[in-house]
Amino acid sequence: MSASFAKGPLKRFSVAISLIGAFLVWELAVRALGLPEYILPAPSKVLTDLVANLHVVLPAALVTLQPMVIGFLAAVVLGVALALLVVYSRAFEAVFYPLLVVLQIIPKIAIAPLFIIWVGFGLPSKVLLVFLLSFFPIVVNSIVAFKSIESELYDLARSYRASRLKIFWRVELPGALPSLFAGFKVAAALSSTAAVVAEFVASDNGLGYLLLNYNGNLNTSMTFAVIVVLSLLGLGLYAVVELVERWMIPWHVSQRRDDFTVGKSPT
Amino acid sequence: MSASFAKGPLKRFSVAISLIGAFLVWELAVRALGLPEYILPAPSKVLTDLVANLHVVLPAALVTLQPMVIGFLAAVVLGVALALLVVYSRAFEAVFYPLLVVLQIIPKIAIAPLFIIWVGFGLPSKVLLVFLLSFFPIVVNSIVAFKSIESELYDLARSYRASRLKIFWRVELPGALPSLFAGFKVAAALSSTAAVVAEFVASDNGLGYLLLNYNGNLNTSMTFAVIVVLSLLGLGLYAVVELVERWMIPWHVSQRRDDFTVGKSPT
Amino acid sequence: NDKVSLRLNWLLSGVHSIFYLGVDKGIYAAEGIDLTIGEGQGSGRAVQVVATGGDTFGIADGGSVIAGVTRGAPVRSVAGVLNTSPYGMSFRADRSVETIKDIEGKTIGATAGEASMQLLPAIWKANDIDPSKVKILNVDGPGKLVAILQGQADGILAGLEGQVIILKQKGLKQKVFSFAELGVNTQGLTVIASDDTIKNNPDLVKRFVRATVKAMQAAKADPEAAVAAAMKAKPQADPKLLAEQLEVSLTLLPSPSAPNAPLGVMARADWQRTLDLMKTYQDVTTDMTADTFFTNSFVQP
Amino acid sequence: MAEAASLDLDLSGRPTSGAGAPAGVVLREVSKAFGEIVALERVDLTIADGEFVAVVGPSGCGKSTLLRLISRLAAPTTGSITVFDDASPLPPRGMSIVFQNHVLLAWRTVLDNVLFPADMVGERRDHYRDKAMELLETVGLAEFAGRYPHELSGGMRQRAAIARALLLKPNLLLMDEPFGALDALTREQMRLDLEALWLKNRMTVLFITHSIDEAVLLADRVIVMTPRPGRIERIMPVGIRRPRGLAARRDPEFLEKSGEITEIFLSRGVLHRED
Amino acid sequence: MAEAASLDLDLSGRPTSGAGAPAGVVLREVSKAFGEIVALERVDLTIADGEFVAVVGPSGCGKSTLLRLISRLAAPTTGSITVFDDASPLPPRGMSIVFQNHVLLAWRTVLDNVLFPADMVGERRDHYRDKAMELLETVGLAEFAGRYPHELSGGMRQRAAIARALLLKPNLLLMDEPFGALDALTREQMRLDLEALWLKNRMTVLFITHSIDEAVLLADRVIVMTPRPGRIERIMPVGIRRPRGLAARRDPEFLEKSGEITEIFLSRGVLHRED
Ligand SMILES: Nc1ncnc2c1ncn2[C@@H]1O[C@H](COP(=O)(O)OP(=O)(O)OP(=O)(O)O)[C@@H](O)[C@H]1O
Ligand SMILES: Nc1ncnc2c1ncn2[C@@H]1O[C@H](COP(=O)(O)OP(=O)(O)OP(=O)(O)O)[C@@H](O)[C@H]1O
Ligand SMILES: [Mg+2]
Ligand SMILES: [Mg+2]
């Protein structure tokens, strides 16, 4: 009975409702506390300013979207590939995995200026930064995903002399999807931050550039407007990843909870 | 036979060797290409500068370590707790999960100045930022982890009328550990970046502060020296997490690969 | 003694050693002020923090004060520190930029959001330069330095008491123009306080300003002592750099509009010009007058 | 409800009905459907307290589903169930289950798996260690106490699961093909052991098996189920004297009853008489 | 090696040895140990091409291990194995396995699980769809073709795994207790079907079972194994005329052979004669 509560259209509503709720709390807080705009602008003000400046913000959003999506996709493909190398090859694991970890741990933001010198201004350096910031969660989750596949499934596939490629496409990939998507989601959520950081460092357009400008002018309400748009981009990417997940792994336990009685434990 | 290649002390050696290898390549590249110091300083120069300034860098490292560790631990505890709420309560999932996602996607770096105004300069705002930057991978991985536990194990536990708490400690937690640790590792790897970002916006000491100083003065070799120390802090935390993992889940598939013949597939 | 905190406009640089000297020599203590100095993250941040009461005083440039006040931040400048704008442009000497007109066809590096960049249209206008012929390369601070050192940019926007000196230390031969000499002098760094503090504790403000002016005089008299004081507080700093920065900063203390005014006194003309420029070239709309943003009443009782 | 509440005070965990006659498991008109698949249809069944009941039926007829309903791990679509006079939807106290697919915890040694019920009911593991080792001895796994499940053969896993189910001296024991992965002889031995245990403890047992012989040899009554949708076709009492031991195989009643059940299935077309 | 290379050209996948006599599976002095646990010790065994061999032995004696070695999914600790004259460590071509615990892919429907081997050998699924449906019909799962494994009962899963193993007409069929989760009568039916299939295709079969009767009824030879460390105790030829069908249960040789095997186990102390 509670199973049907958060399903279907209601579920989608609830997302909207909780967002609207958050905005309402924000508006009320600003009014009740009488917060001045230079500290926290009211969402109503942010919205009107945003609408008034849509002609500036929208093109910038398109500019930011590109490195976000390209960098994310690159992270997905290369992250999974690296994970496979780590899982398959002990030599690779021994030599390159530590380097991967180090690469992840080095604060990219600190060395971002160097990327510009190495890769050049504009899209390439942005893509690189987004890629570097978001590929590690994918690698780590993919490694867990692939290592967790039951060895019996490999036995089954190998008993038919299946090629590595077939085992990958028919056994490992579908079996690993739930964990893979956990990594993809974390990476998707990081990618908007990564894109904006990249634009902080080197860019003459995009939302990050706008953010710097508005921030410099103490134009808090437009700063927040840009943050809202940026968050929407990130949410969009995240939602796409979730949609793809739902479409690709309808069979996973985490998706079929109806006959599954956790949380309704009797005691 | 290849199973014994990367085990025991050799494994640890290989980490050191690959790091040393990376440093050698770096040094040679700088010399061969004749790169000026402000583009990429030679590691030898970085090292000598680091040693000369240890009295400045070490105290700063201690300052940075605090928010890193506190924020990470907070993220572990609260991240797992939030994941449990999402997994157990459909109402919570419907209402708060979207907010969690939004909270993650909002570029914290952009709103970090607000934290300063709200929480003040110094440790609290740093801890908050580290927490916010690193808790999401933990939440997402924990959700997957808990949702992937076989329902049969729940049935077994429930057949003994076990309390929720017992089910959690004896079934869910151990069963979820492998995926949980994937999240912890991603978060640990993020935490040094998070701490330094926090110090970029809200601090007048710590490694992030030094980084800003040296970076602003184009003192690249000290910039790299600080990045090296920062990376070592991050690696240290990561290594601790991996150690704890090895100690807590010796039974996990990803840890016992010896009779497990992936990658040695015949075709 | 009053416990007072001062939020600097940025990380330690030469000009700030004035305040460290003041603490070190007991100038503030003599006025009954127990001062803690905190480094900052930009003038705008300092305005916000002082406005909310997080810090008692702050250092901020005139533009940031105007931006903040017109958006409702209850603060005011109570003393001028750099009354000549420190903004400038630096070119590689090997790119043959002799007069400002030669900038046409060149690439200059700038950071989005930095105040001097927003004044560029005024520079173009005042010097009859065709903006479409100048290419702007947007990079962050360190990136700017690397870009000019590498020759990817012919010039950059550089603070006269900041990046110009760093470039000099890196051995770059430069041709430097200051905004002031290009006809766009804006109000430089000032000491700010919140309206609350000014209203409820005018005596504290008065004492603080008095001590600050004394510290400026002391720094002028003995720059080496000022650098030493700063080094004591921030041992990781580079003393040679600080010394050179301070040397240039001291030349920027008086305003070209009123070269003979006492230390700390701001020129209304500078504020007016800053306000006009911001109204023309930035999204500032207000009917406030220049006097809303500053007061000399604490410097000249 | 008031009755159920008062029963909580009975620490033996095995309440008796007010009238004095012990009631075990009672199912009234119970059905269970999974979407369009009807697994059980209108099942009426009463098992006395302390009775040994076996269930046989073709694969997929709903035996495991019946077990899940009685254990309260799943709720019936319609109908009512009481266990020891308790109609609450909680798993009954003092119940142990041997699941069809063993369900061992991969991260625990065999011994710790057997001790798992102690953890679940909040008892100290140490108190049960000797008991657990004894049970492992009985099922022939003493040597493997310190090993992990993945190091066991299929039959060894099943025996570990049986040992686990017996740790807390259940008064309701539900077993789903518990000897399915065992060879004929180990199986025979386990059957003898189970009978001996039951004679000693007289717990209520529901024993699902795909061996008609085993059902007749063990049970007081054999429940014969029809193919999906599962119903009870016949309930057959078996009166062979106990202890039955190995000799029961030669008892005429054994031959008669098992032949009769086979006939039921043959008539149901479960087996085609093609030769 | 040169021989193995030339065999690759034989598309039937079933090479014959140069001398003309068909060789199936040959094990010489094969042992397998897992750390200190010795699972198999010095096993010598020859299975002719086209022969039906059954393996019986107590739980944990190494039957599954034997199957894994022959399938080349695991390597022996010592000793040599050739399958169809091929000593290479690759799984033999044309082999199918029914694993002891079914091993279905959770994300595929029953039909797609049965079609899995077609994917693995790189054949188009469509070509096999009819065959797969036919097999599902035979094992009584046609109705469940579109369902997922978690919607099946234990026995139904096992039948799906059997259907899968038969999809590609294997010439080497390794079955690990394939009827273990089936009720007696479905089991009897499956046995008849398997015999019929074997009579038609004459593939080499290694059939592990814990039913002595089943072994004797199905096999040309029954391999009797001892408890751990597993060794071959006796290899017993069964000469009952084929097709054996249901009638074989009344054949005197059946009674004699199964009695004999039971005696071996009794003498080995697998079963205590306590009554
Ligand atoms: N979770 C489920 N979802 C859908 N159908 C199910 C589910 N569980 C069981 N069924 C169906 O219910 C029927 C009965 O299943 P059950 O497991 O009770 O059979 P069983 O008698 O135990 O069979 P077996 O002897 O093969 O174990 C089957 O047709 C099965 O497909
Ligand atoms: N991966 C492993 N690690 C350690 N020991 C193992 C492993 N696999 C099997 N063994 C051991 O090898 C022995 C034989 O196991 P095997 O699975 O072959 O038995 P089996 O004859 O198939 O038994 P059953 O009839 O119960 O399935 C057992 O003692 C088991 O504990
Ligand atoms: Mg069942
Ligand atoms: Mg086995």
Image (tube, coloured by chain):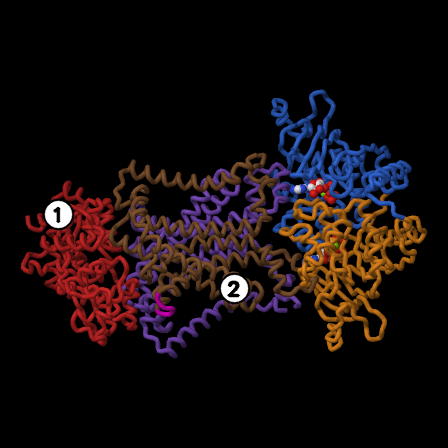
Chain colours: A brown, B purple, C red, D blue, E orange
Q: Chain of mark 1?
A: C
Relative image position of residue C112 (x, y in whole percent):
28, 59
Task: Determine which residue is flagged by label 2.
Answer: A82
Q: Secondary structure at mark 2?
A: helix
- The amino acid type of the residue labelled 1 equals Thr
Marks 2 and 1, how far apart at CA: 62 Å
Q: Residue at x 33, y 52 (%)?
A: A57
Q: Is residue D242 magenta?
A: no
Q: Residue at x 64, y 65 (%)?
A: A163
**Whereabouts is ligand 4, in terms of quadrant?**
bottom right
Is E110 drawn above or below residue E23 in the view shown? Answer: above
Name the residue nearer the viewer: D78 or C86.
D78
- The amino acid type of the residue labelled 2 equals Leu
Which mark is drawn over residue C289?
1
Left or right? Give the position of D55 relative to C126. Answer: right
Whether residue C250 appears in this view of the structure is no
Q: Quadrant of residue D71?
A: top right
